[in-house]
Image (cartoon, grey):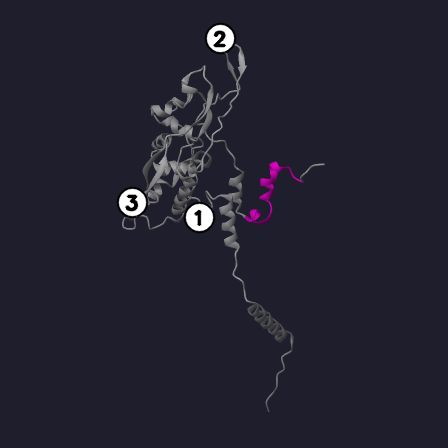
Amino acid sequence: MPLHKYPPAIWGAQKLKEGIYSRLPQHYLQSLKETRKPTPVHWIPHGAKYKLNPKTGQRERVQDVPIQIYYPPEANKGLWGGEGWISGYKYANNDKLSSRVKKTWKPQLFDRELYSEILDKKFTITVTMRTLDLIDAVYGFDFYILKTPKEDLNSKLGMDLKRAMLLRLARRDSNLHPNDPAKREQIYNKYKKFGHIHSETEAVGKLQSPSVKKELPDSLISVVDTDVADKEFEIPYEEAEWVGLSLEEAVEKQRLLEKKDPVPLFKVYVNELVQELESQQLTEPLVVVKKH
């Protein structure tokens, strides 16, 4: 006899079908169901199930085993470009005859000031060299935030910035350069359409930086111009305000939207009495008295 009515693996999906979770907007629920694997950063996938052995010429099966990456809470406060902590072992004093000791490899972090055209504001953000290379690859900080999918951003700060940019584009806010309408329209038209990058390798393939090339196989380094489909970027305001929210934040937002102020009982009873009197007057015949 099973211990649970539903297996624990589907508890998360079942939860979204009941209570306040089921009343969340459909586009937000759909975004929770979309699960794509992030772009490999610390390892290079083979891209095929089999390869030829260079010595024997025989076909051998290969496996893509991703490296386990730990993302500390600090990663949500910056833009690490998909990098994280990797735990492993190393030989003590670089001597293979000595014992192995645990080691954690961490990315090199920098504090850089990045400017957003849409928000017209500068942000001091903790980034890695890979993040700076990816920003250069798509020709701007705003384009990097808007084009990179959430699984590659892997940052709460990045998703909050994306939501703020989408909201301003949806409103076409006049607070952006109020004294220069021509420049404001130029910025809005610039980000009206964008080529959605489904993986960071498409952006890195355009970049000629040696620091990025060494992370990619030869087949991707040769890609200089990638055909990217244009996608309408100005999504409705009602959808933009839900982008990047965690499930807890979305539930709290839905709760506030459904919240209603309590109505005093005397007002309820007064309205019911008024309705009863009106209905009674309509049902009773009107008596007309003639004056002599």
- Decide whether the magenta segment is chiefly helix, strand or loop: helix
Say what amino acid the circle numbered 1 marks. Answer: Tyr
**Residues at badges 2 and 3 in contact (C-beta under 8 Å)?**
no
Identified at 44% across, 38% down, the residue is 73
Identified at 47% across, 19% down, the residue is 99
Q: What number is the disc on residue 237?
A: 1
Residue 222 shows in this picture:
no
Which quarter of the figure is the C terminus placed in?
A: bottom right
Residue 91 position in % (x across, y down): 44, 19
Name the residue beneath numbered marker 2: 55
Q: CA distance from mark 1 to mark 2?
A: 60 Å
For the residue carrying disc 3, how many other residues have a C-alpha within 10 Å: few (<14), some (14-19), or many (20+)?
A: few
Residue 21 position in % (x across, y down): 56, 47
**Residues at badges 1 and 3 in contact (C-beta under 8 Å)?**
no
Q: Is residue 259 magenta?
A: no
Name the residue beneath numbered marker 3: 183
Say what amino acid the circle numbered 3 marks. Answer: Lys
Which residues are the magenta region?
Answer: 5-23
Mark 1 or 2, closer to the camera:
2
Q: CA distance from mark 1 to mark 3?
A: 22 Å
For the residue carrying disc 1, how many other residues have a C-alpha within 10 Å: few (<14), some (14-19), or many (20+)?
A: some
Residue 70 shows in this picture:
yes
Front in this rendered view, residue 30 or 155? 155
Say what amino acid the circle numbered 2 marks. Answer: Lys
User: Toward which corner of the image does residue 115 lie, by quadrant?
Assistant: top left
Sequence order check, earlier mark of 1 and 2: 2
Vertical arrangement, residue 281 with respect to residue 211, above or below: below
Helix, strand or loop at label 3? It is helix
Q: Is residue 12 magenta?
A: yes
